[in-house]
Each structure stands twice: as structure tokens, then as C-alpha cells.
Image: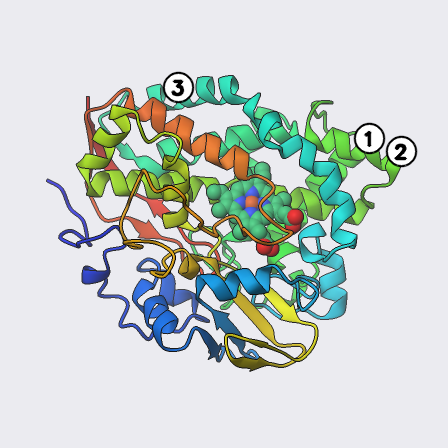
Amino acid sequence: MMVDQQAGASNADGLDAAAHDDGHMDLSDHDSFTGGIPHRTFERLRAEDPVHWTPEHDGGRGFWSVTGHADIMTANGNNAVFSSGQGIRIEDQSHAEYMARRTFQETDPPEHRQTRRFLNPVFSRPAIARYEELVRSLAADIVEQAFARDEFDAVDALAKQLPMMMLGRILGVPDADLPFLVEKGDALIGNSDPDFTDTIIDKADTDAYRFMPFRSPAGAELYDYAQAVMDGHKEVDPEGILARVLGANSEQGVMEARDFKNFFCLLVAAGNDTTRYSIAMALYQLTRDPALLQQMQAGAVWNTVSDEFIRLASPTMYFRRTATEDTELGGKAIAKGDKVILWFVSGNRDQRVFEDPHGVNLARDPNPHLAFGQGGVHLCLGMWLARMEVRVLLEEIAGRISGIEALGAPTWTRSNFICGVKSLPVRIRR
Ligand code: HEM
């Protein structure tokens, strides 16, 4: 029997059946996201108040919610005024906390440029294209192993595996360490979700971890791992990114020790869950609409498939900027120091840019979505890798089954930062 909490909905986002979202959800509250992305709320804001002052329910100083595609692009393209240099999540940090935890993602040009220039060649489209054969063989193994059974959890068995394995190859760490790194990465980025951490950011006293990434104890464990790599106590692949950064450090001074540890945490956090939740979104949509699998099997949509599922998933729902001067955005007066939240997830449903924004259109082209932070200098470093992983895994799946159905409702992350389907019981038909 097919069970779906949003069955009967007319579109991919299930707006018609989204009982959890009354259009007035509190975007500062992680609990507003446990039933799925509150699209109805975002839709109302885009229509009524696209740059919306949002109080923080836990006593924070509040922030501007930027929800329209054009305003997000404007702010993201102007880092002199909308800076990443005071933190990129809603949480406020003291200067000392910011300095202890920051990565190059939390800097502006020109400082941002040096690290980015060093990393670009490793993650460029042609560099990543060279991994395709490896990605395909890993994907084929994952799919074969999952399909040894007819019923399984699609996130654990399919979505989680490939990003983890490829991150291991890119970093150059031993395969045996991957489950540990993924568990800690989940705890960092899922710091508000009881399934991923016991130290829940808005419920526990996290003061002791304020100098750790994501104010999380998992940050300390990842720091220790990075320290072991730096001290030569952990054997890493000399071709991997960790060895290359450390080698370059001695020659070009790319990163200080503290920056290296934070960079390591950033990759472990950014490289895993985002791609996992994009694949999970694809699988969820396949369970909702059998025609999607048929379209993929017909073959014409493989160039556009990844971006459409990544648009729908928008796993990192927002990144924050801070105004460096009094300014104006979308007709609102923004004061110097205000927090400005760019809700990429909302821009990706903007009906002024996307026809049928809540629908799945596997052939959507162009697809000017913002899920990778398009339009800004922080444009996702891993986007070519993520796109390839999503496509190749789906190709391997589509070549082996005639159908996939949900055996229960998906569960969603408890977070207003990272969104995704955490579990999805499915049955496949060969
Ligand atoms: C579908 C998967 C992914 C999504 C949706 C995603 C999303 C994003 C977004 C929105 C940004 C911009 C942040 C900002 O504006 O401040 C970003 C930056 C970044 N991403 Fe991704 N990401 C994905 C996969 C990956 C992967 C696989 C890696 C690494 C292996 C990665 C590494 C990074 C890094 C290092 C940055 C910072 C770049 C900079 O500051 O210059 N991401 N990502």
C-alpha cells in the first residue's frame, strides 16, 4: 500500500495538503520545518512582504527575511554591503567566536580570494568530470547492494552513501573513517535536530562549545581529527585535498592551522548532507509521481535532471549576510549591522522566475535556481561534484527498476538552515 502524508497534492511541494504550514510559520523556529519546508509561508511573504522583518522567538535581535529571487540576487552580488564577514547563519557570534570558527566562507573579497583561487582547480567542472567513472562504479555498487532487498530506507541505503564515499576520495581520508566523519558532520550541520545530536542548539547549554564549529561538541572531535592529519598521525592520500592544502601551506601559506581545522569541518559538513538531501528529494519525488521515472528512462532529461531536483531540495535553505552600511533592499531600509537572511529555498519557488514553481519539470531549461548560492562570490565549490553525484546515482537507479513506492511518510530535518528528507521507507519494483 502506498502511504504519503501529502498524497493527493497537486504538486511536488504538496502545498494543498501541507497541514503543518498555515502561511504564518515562524522562520526563526526550527520546529516550523519538521513537517517539511513551510512553502506556504514563503509564498505569502514573497507576495506580501518580500523583505520581511522577522523577530527571533528565542530573544535574538531579529533579521530581515529576503524571499524573492531578484532581491536575493541583488544582495548576494554585493558583498561590500551584504557581507559574509560576521557570520553566515542566524546565530549571533561575538568577534572572538567568529574569529575562532570562521572559514573562508565567512570572509569577503579580497581575503576570500586567495583560498578560493587555490581550491577552484580541484573542484572545477573538468577536474570533477574526471571522477565520473569512479562515481559510476561506486553508484552501481551502492544501488546493487540496496536492491538486494525490495524494501529499505531510501535515505540510508541510497542517498547517504555516495556523497560520503566521494567526500572521502576528495579529502583523501581512509574509507574506514567515513562513518565517523559523516556522523560528526551530521551533528554539526544538524545541530538543532535530536536525531543527529544530544546537544541541541536551542535546548541545551552550548556555551562550552562556543568556539567550536556550529557550537557543537562534534566540532571538537573533528578538530582532533584534523590535528592528527596535520601532525602526520593520520595517513592521507597525497593526491587528496587535505594533503595538497597542507603541502601548499609550507610553500604558499594558504591556511593557518586554525583555518585548516575549520576548513576540514566545513568540507565534512558541506560535502555530505547537501548532496544526500538532494538525492533524497529526487527519490521522494519518484515515489510521488511514477511518470518521473519513465521520463528519466526515456533518456532525454539527464542534462537537466540534477538541477531540477537540487532546486526543489534547496538543502541549505539560507545563508546570512550582515549589512556593512545603512542601505535599502526591496524598498526596506536596512540598518548597518542588521542580519539579512537570503532564503535561497524561497527564491527557488519564485513564480516570477519559475513557471509552475512547485512542480517538477525534469526538462526545465534554463533553470536559474539559487541552491548553490548563484550570483555570489561564494558560489558553491562542490556544485559540479554534487550535480554529477545526483545524476549518476539516478541513472544507475533508473536502469534497474520499473517503479519505487513509499511505504510510509518521509521524516524531515528539524532545522531552519538545512532541510531534507531524513528517512523514507520504500519498496522497489524490478
Ligand atoms: C547539492 C549539494 C550542495 C548544495 C545545495 C550546496 C549549497 C551551497 C551554497 C548555497 C553555498 C554558498 C554559501 C554562501 O553563499 O555563503 C555553498 C558554498 C560552498 N559549498 Fe556547497 N553545496 C552543495 C554541495 C557541496 C559539496 C559536495 C561540497 C564539497 C565537497 C561543497 C562545498 C562548499 C564550499 C567549500 C562552499 C564555500 C565556498 C566559498 O565560500 O567560496 N558543497 N554551497
Question: What residue do we see at 23% from left, 23% from top?
Answer: 401
Task: Please state the horizontal and vertical placement of residue 111, each as a whole percent of the image.
Answer: 78, 53
Q: Which structural element holds mark 3?
A: helix
Nearer to us in this view, 423 or 291: 291
Nearer to us in this view, 208 or 303: 303
C-alpha span from label 3 to label 1: 34 Å
Q: Which structural element holds mark 2?
A: helix
Task: Please state the horizontal and vertical placement of residue 354, each as a whole percent of the image.
Answer: 35, 54
Nearer to us in this view, 233 or 391: 391
Question: What residue do we see at 69% from left, 45% from top?
Answer: 263
- Crowding at mark 2 (Cα within 10 Å: few <14, some 14-19, many 20+): few
Visual colour scheme? rainbow
- Asked if residue 146 can be seen in this view, the reply is no
C-alpha span from label 2 to label 3: 40 Å
Mark 2 lies on residue: 251
- Crowding at mark 1 (Cα within 10 Å: few <14, some 14-19, many 20+): some
Mark 3 lies on residue: 140
Question: What residue do we see at 28% from left, 48% from top?
Answer: 410
Which quarter of the rendering shows the C terminus? top left
Task: Please state the horizontal and vertical placement of residue 17, each as a whole percent of the image.
Answer: 19, 60
Would you place residue 328 above or below residue 82 in this image? below
Mark 1 lies on residue: 247
Which quarter of the rendering shows the N terminus? top left
Taking 286 as reference, is 220 left or right? right
Which of pointers 3 and 1 lies earlier in the amino acid sequence? 3
Taking 300 as reference, is 135 left or right? right
C-alpha span from label 2 to label 1: 7 Å
In the rendered structure, are the residues bearing label 2 and label 1 in contact, judged by CB atoms less than 8 Å apart?
yes
Amino acid, disc 1: Gly
Amino acid, disc 2: Glu
Which of pointers 2 and 3 lies earlier in the amino acid sequence? 3
